[in-house]
Image: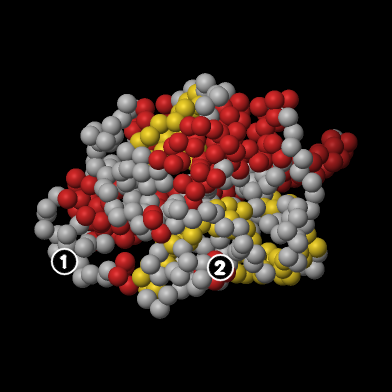
Amino acid sequence: MITMLKRPFPGGIHPDGHKDLTAHNKIRKDIKPKRLFLSLQQRNGTILRPLVGVGESVGKGQLLAKGISDMCVPLHSPVNGIVEDIKQHVTAHPSGLKCKTLVIKSNDNPLWAVAYPPCNVTKLSPQEMLQRVLDAGIVGLGGAGFPSGIKLRLARQKKIHTLLINGGECEPYITCDDRLMQESAADIVAGVDIMLTITGAKQAIIAIEDNKPSSIEVIKTACDHLDTISVQAVPSLYPMGSERHLVKAVTGRLIPPGQLSVALGILVHNVATAKSVYHAVSYRRPLIDRVITISGGGIEQPGNFVVPIGTPIADLLGAAGGLKVNAERLIAGGPMMGQIIRSTFAPVDKSIGAVLALSDTEVKPQQSHECVRCGRCVTACPMGLMPFQMASHTRISDFEGAQDYGIDHCLLCGACAYVCPSRIPLTQYFHHAKGAINAIRQMANKSTVTRKLAVARSDRLEKEAEAKKAAKAAKTAKRRRPARRAKEKEV
């Protein structure tokens, strides 16, 4: 049993939580945007093909776009309305990327386009359940955004033995999973039970940080009748929500570097994902909305909201009473790992779990100074890395040196920057280094592919030339045969 007196993993920090801003308010369901913007390019870069055209009426839950493989989760309409346009529009990507987007004008009818009666899930095979998850367009709602059906199928193929449900929610300000566990405990447990059937795992453990006693109690009550599902409290230590550290905290085992948790026979999913799986399998309802925390000292009425996918961030801020005059910075996600919002016209996608409006006092801009070699960043790093060394190599663009110090294993959790007394923006350095390293790798891969294509072209041209030469020789030989025959007659 894990106790508060023992750290479940090396490093980690205790940032100010600020969760009281929203933790005690029920989830609101009154966000009704007039227009939704559904990006046809997903976070993993895959492109969806629209199945509807401009001017076409669409119903709530209708399939709007799909890709060419299961890696492209399908997109469904969150509202009843009409396709007003298909155009380039800004996305929620931190770069401010624009892509082709479906613009849906809502008609304010809240009903589903078709009925979704409950079914007896005990009559479904694991394959039928899995197909319903794939059809529903569910991705991991913890932030990674990986297709959930793919993870479940991989887990079944790998014959995992344990399903680990992440209820950690260690980022400051964010309470959407906490409220979801308190208000939808039965749905979450039912979803976990379905995932057990799909994967074939023998047990499921729902891990919840011990600063959420109400959620622990409610979830325990909801799964009290099931021997295969249990609840385990874990210490409140950032970044407990990381898959690698949650597995270490609950099982004591380390995921090998460069591998996934399935290598240990464990699959990790988020509590919100479990609820979506329950609705997809039991009712065949697609994923069209999610619960999002809107919080921070710069927002008038912080809270948790059920938000249709595609809702502009400006509409969320309006539903939460708008921004205060001291609002300094908008962030998608938590303050430790979130990204600055470039445009409030950007829509919410399936990966965003929070929108924060931080005030000027919360941002606390401070001048950075030279590293004093105090070693606090090393102590705080949950991956056992040396952040000050990685930063010093990154500053001179020595990315190979940064890799030697393990930057590929950096989680970008921000724990090192949080404790740095010199206020060095370490996380920004590591974002830059990882981006540069990825660009170098892509260039190297591109060069390799180009060389292979050049060699293949040269081989092909050489073979074609030889074939032409052979054909020409054959043709010449064929022309000479009558002359030889004529000469033979004269003789």
Q: Nearer the viewer, residue 368 or 362?
A: 362
Is 111 situated left or right of 298 in this image? right
Coloring basis for residues: secondary structure
The type of residue carrying mark 2 is: Ala
Mark 2 surroundings within 10 Å by alpha-carbon count, few (fewer than 14), some (14 through 19), many (20 or more): many
Q: In terms of secondary structure, where does tag 2 sit? A: helix
The N terminus lies in which quarter of the figure?
Answer: top left
Q: Amino acid at mark 1?
A: His
Q: Which residue sits at x=51%, y=67%? A: 320
Picture mark count? 2
Left or right placement of residue 353 versus residue 130 in this view: left
Quarter of the view holding residue 431: bottom left
Give the label on residue 369, or none: 1
Instruction: Say whether residue 415 is left or right of residue 181.
Output: left
- Side of 65 where 162 appears, left or right: left
Give the camera-side residue of 465 and 224: 224
Q: Is residue 260 visible?
A: no
Q: Residue at x 37, y 30 (%)?
A: 250
Q: What quarter of the picture does the C terminus occupy?
A: top right
Do tag 1 and tag 2 residues touch (Cβ < 8 Å)? no
Residue 158: horizontal and vertical position, in percent?
52, 25
Residues 45 and 438: in front is: 45
Q: Percent position (x, y) of residue 476? A: 75, 45
The answer to whether residue 231 of the structure is visible from this angle is: yes
- Determine the residue positioned at 80% across, 68% down: 55
Q: Position of residue 207 (x, y in %)?
A: 42, 35
From the top left corner, tell me how far across and down residue 47 is, in percent.
62, 55
Q: Is 130 drawn above or below residue 407 in the view shown?
A: above
Dot 1 falls on a residue whose secondary structure is: loop
Residue behind mark 2 = 319
Q: Residue at x 63, y 38 (%)?
A: 278
CA gap between label 1 and label 2 equals 40 Å
